[in-house]
Amino acid sequence: MMKIISVIGARPQFIKAASVSRMMKKAGIKEVLIHTGQHYDYNMSQVFFKQLKIKEPEYNLGIGSMSHGSQTGRMIEKIEGVLLAEKPGLMLVYGDTNSTLAGSLAAAKLHIPVAHVEAGLRSYNRNMPEEINRVLTDHVSDVLFCPTETAVENLRKEGFKNIVNKGKLIKNSSALHDLQSFPFVINVGDVMYDSVLYNLAIAKKISKIIKKYKLLPQRYYLATIHRAENTDNTSRLKSICKAFNKIAERYPLIFPAHPRTEKLLSRIGYINSNLKIIPPVSYWDMLMLSSFARVILTDSGGLQKEAFFLNVPCVTLRDETEWVETLQSGMNVIAGASEGKILRAVKTQEMQKRDRKDTRFFGDGKAAEKMLSIIKKTLA
């Protein structure tokens, strides 16, 4: 039986891994799960395992918050020990966290093939730790599963030549019959789209969060901030919070905040009564909050996409985005951390129509199924 080791450690990875793990089980592949512990709070970790029915990890490394170098180094050391003991046929990593980089480097050093889910994303901002992680991971990977044609083109520019199906979304694995060598690049679509399609109906039945906070559809805003470029920069954080306070004068602004972010917000003191800071919420609750929001304000790449999938206007609190496809329809705009730009962007986004049905940029909702078919064909 083929054995695959999957490394996860942060909330977005749990969501992606749930779809892929479900297909692994269906395909008869043995999965060994490593949880690095990068996100360890119950509301950021365990609740996702429970809701998304992810099996308990065989290995929980318990590596929490610390400096990037210390965290990544400890992860590499512990993951290497697991790889030596388990001897898998493939290492599967997701996204752009320190867990992603540690897993890919540990496997590459031991000559274990690496498959990178969500390969090819680029912000071209090397000040972002995520950008360093994703670039390095791509360049040690053997199978690069891209979510969009833009991601494929980014890799083409960086010298990857073995591009399956000319970068177009692959419909099935028949295009692999003449594939001779690693590494190869393939557009399978976005696994987070799989997840939204699968979980939205469940969330509508199970989640009680709209009722809990007495929210009315399109009569509240939803915001998240977590990236270091915003949370570690006091002037940016203050500017964003000033905008939040003004926005919240019209309708409540719901802000699920990581404990660290909440401490930073309390410290700078830019919070009024209409800005409702709540603990991090489960995936199903977040889908419901996103679905009925008037506008979403975020620096999260995953939430930008979920807003796009759900036809909800979005304002990105960064100076660039990897998900350029979300900008093309106008459903997402970049505002950075400028108070004025944020306020103007919200005003513009409130006028967006919500009847767009075009999600073709991100595939057909069968990304995980295609990944497993490709893995079985190429690594069997």
Image (cartoon, rainbow, N blue to C red):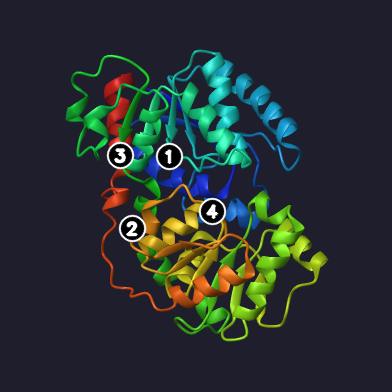
As measured in the structure, the alpha-carbon distance from the residue carrying label 3 to the one carrying label 1 is: 10 Å
Task: Identify which amino acid the numbered label 1 is placed on.
Answer: Glu
Question: For the residue labelled by badge 1, is the local secondary structure a helix, a strand or a loop?
Answer: loop
Most extreme residue toward the right is 267
| Residue corresponding to mark 4 | 48
Disc 3 versus disc 4: nearer the observer: 3
Disc 3 versus disc 2: nearer the observer: 3
Task: Identify which amino acid the numbered label 4 is placed on.
Answer: Phe
- Left or right: where 181 falls relative to 213: left
Disc 4 versus disc 2: nearer the observer: 2
Q: Earlier in the sequence, mark 3 or mark 4?
A: 4
Q: Earlier in the sequence, mark 3 or mark 1?
A: 1
- Left or right: where 292 falls relative to 272: left
- Residue 16, given in percent of the width and then of the height, sits at 44, 46
User: In the drawing, what numbered circle is on residue 188?
Assistant: 3
Q: Earlier in the sequence, mark 2 or mark 1?
A: 1
Which quadrant of the rendered structure holds the N terminus? top left
Q: Is residue 173 above or below residue 367?
A: above
| Residue corresponding to mark 1 | 118
User: In the drawing, what numbered circle is on residue 197?
Assistant: 2
- Residue 241, given in percent of the width and then of the height, sits at 68, 70
